[in-house]
Image (cartoon, rainbow, N blue to C red):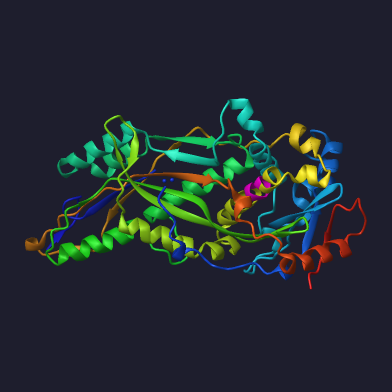
């Protein structure tokens, strides 16, 4: 019996550094939010007023900064002189206290609103969808290919591969400030996804891409099938999925706004850039489809707050898009000058480069007969990111939906304490 210890006879080398293909709608959750789940309203005029009174003192106005306790954003409503944010205060589905649900952050709305209003675009001279990328450098990929080709002769492959894979990846933010709350949340989950895809971090019972490929290769190799090699680059990225928004009488109700995880096989082109191969890594596709299917559950779970934070950024982007493209400031008569022009976003320590993530696998107790030496090569670097693109969102809105929105409008107006109220609970019948 012979212990399997290197890439051609049993170790698996994976470099995950973590963004595009077409979403498979069959993978997406198809759940609509009922109107009677809306239970809280926030006045954007009050938020603007309170933060303007605080000036640039970030120790002031904590209620307004956190939307007075609202932790889910589900729509917006115009009333004379104000825009009302519709949403929920929801407790966790675990034994943890309600405050463990990540709070909404006004910075996420402000950043997305300035982006949708083209304020950042005018500053830099161009506009792209809001997003981030964490990408391996082409030279690093070439080095990994070289190490992979030589690894059978290396005695220190356990150290050589991680050293090559840990070379810096470039981190970029698009259309919102780098280091803003939205930027930090997108980069955090994207970097964490690299660990999930290689199996060094876990989400429920979701099997990693590595484990899926390994199962296939080991089964084929032990059956005496020529497995060949699995290689190339995979790009993973979170993107906009299916949406369902209804509107009438100035009420915009977001019944569904899916976040999906997509994948795309890539290769390094002759000009030194990563380009789509047009192919599919089946294990990667299964992984992204299964994560997409459980996305609603993950967003509501206190065990993985990164998904709720990511969903918040997507939802604020959709609301900001509606405000800008539906001209809601003009229609409502509210111009939140402080939020648009003067509010200072908090900036977080988000680096421009991040060390690559690697993992070297050995199969525990993997003993094979001498005459059945496994010949397996498995090298899967990846890049990734987040892209939030709700252009043309108004074209998909279901208009004249009085049946769906009138109960919300009635509850909001009936429960409003006075025109200067900051926030209030509502009960939709």
Q: Residue lying furthest right in this view?
A: 418
Q: Is residue 153 above or below residue 27?
A: above
Based on the picture, tell me whether residue 21 belongs to the magenta stretch: no
Q: Position of residue 197 (x, y in %)?
A: 40, 54
Q: Is residue 14 left or right of residue 148?
A: right
Where does the magenta region start and end?
317-321
Q: Residue lying furthest front in this view?
A: 400
Query: Split into 4 quadrants, where in the image is the N terminus?
Result: bottom left
Residue at the image position 59 percent from the left and 47 percent from the top: 392
Residue toward you, 227 or 6: 227
Residue 107 appears in which quarter of the rendering? top right
Residue toward you, 157 or 417: 417
Based on the picture, tell me whether residue 320 belongs to the magenta stretch: yes
Q: Residue lying furthest bottom in this view?
A: 429
Q: Is residue 224 left or right of residue 382?
A: left
Residue toward you, 316 or 8: 316
Residue at the image position 48 percent from the left and 36 percent from the top: 171
Q: Is residue 255 above or below residue 113?
A: below
- Visible in this render: residue 302? no
Residue 207 appears in which quarter of the rendering? bottom left
Residue at the image position 15 percent from the left and 41 percent from the top: 153
Q: Position of residue 427 (x, y in %)?
A: 80, 69
Query: Split into 4 quadrants, where in the image is the C terminus?
Result: bottom right
């Amino acid at each position: 019996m012979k212990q399997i210890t290197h890439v051609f006879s049993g170790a698996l080398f994976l470099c995950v550094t973590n963004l595009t293909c077409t979403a498979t709608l069959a993978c997406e959750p198809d759940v609509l939010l009922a109107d009677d789940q809306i239970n809280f309203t926030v006045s954007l005029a009050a938020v603007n007023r309170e933060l303007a009174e605080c000036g640039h003192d970030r120790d002031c106005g904590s209620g307004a900064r956190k939307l007075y306790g609202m932790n889910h954003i589900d729509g917006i409503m115009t009333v004379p002189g104000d825009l009302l944010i519709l949403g929920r205060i929801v407790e966790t589905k675990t034994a943890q206290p309600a405050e463990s649900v990540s709070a909404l952050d006004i910075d996420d709305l402000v950043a997305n609103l300035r982006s949708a209003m083209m304020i950042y675009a005018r500053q830099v001279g161009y506009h792209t969808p809001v997003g981030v990328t964490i990408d391996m450098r082409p030279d690093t990929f070439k080095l990994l290919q070289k190490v992979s080709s030589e690894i059978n002769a290396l005695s220190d492959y356990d150290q050589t591969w991680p050293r090559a894979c840990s070379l810096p990846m470039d981190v970029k933010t698009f259309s919102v400030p780098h280091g803003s709350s939205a930027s930090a949340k997108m980069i955090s989950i994207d970097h964490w996804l690299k660990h999930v895809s290689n199996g060094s971090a876990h989400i429920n019972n979701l099997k990693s891409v590595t484990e899926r490929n390994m199962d296939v290769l080991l089964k084929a190799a032990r059956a005496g099938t020529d497995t060949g090699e699995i290689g190339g680059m995979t790009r993973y990225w979170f993107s906009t999925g299916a949406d369902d928004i209804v509107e009438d009488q100035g009420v915009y109700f977001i019944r569904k706004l899916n976040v999906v995880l997509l994948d795309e096989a890539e290769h390094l082109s002759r000009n030194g850039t990563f380009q789509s191969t047009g192919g599919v890594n089946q294990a990667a596709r299964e992984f992204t489809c299964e994560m997409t299917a459980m996305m609603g559950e993950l967003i509501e779970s206190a065990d993985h707050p990164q998904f709720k934070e990511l969903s918040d950024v997507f939802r604020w982007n959709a609301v900001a898009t509606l405000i800008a493209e539906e001209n809601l400031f003009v229609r409502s008569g509210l111009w939140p000058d402080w939020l648009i022009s003067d509010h200072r976003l908090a900036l977080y320590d988000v680096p421009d480069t991040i060390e690559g993530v690697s993992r070297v696998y050995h199969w525990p107790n993997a003993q094979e007969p001498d005459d059945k030496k496994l010949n397996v090569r498995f090298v899967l670097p990846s890049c990734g990111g987040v892209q939030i693109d709700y252009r043309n969102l108004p074209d998909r809105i279901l208009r004249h939906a009085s049946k769906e929105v009138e109960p919300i409008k009635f509850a909001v107006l009936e429960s409003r304490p006075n025109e200067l109220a900051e926030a209030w609970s509502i009960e939709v019948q």
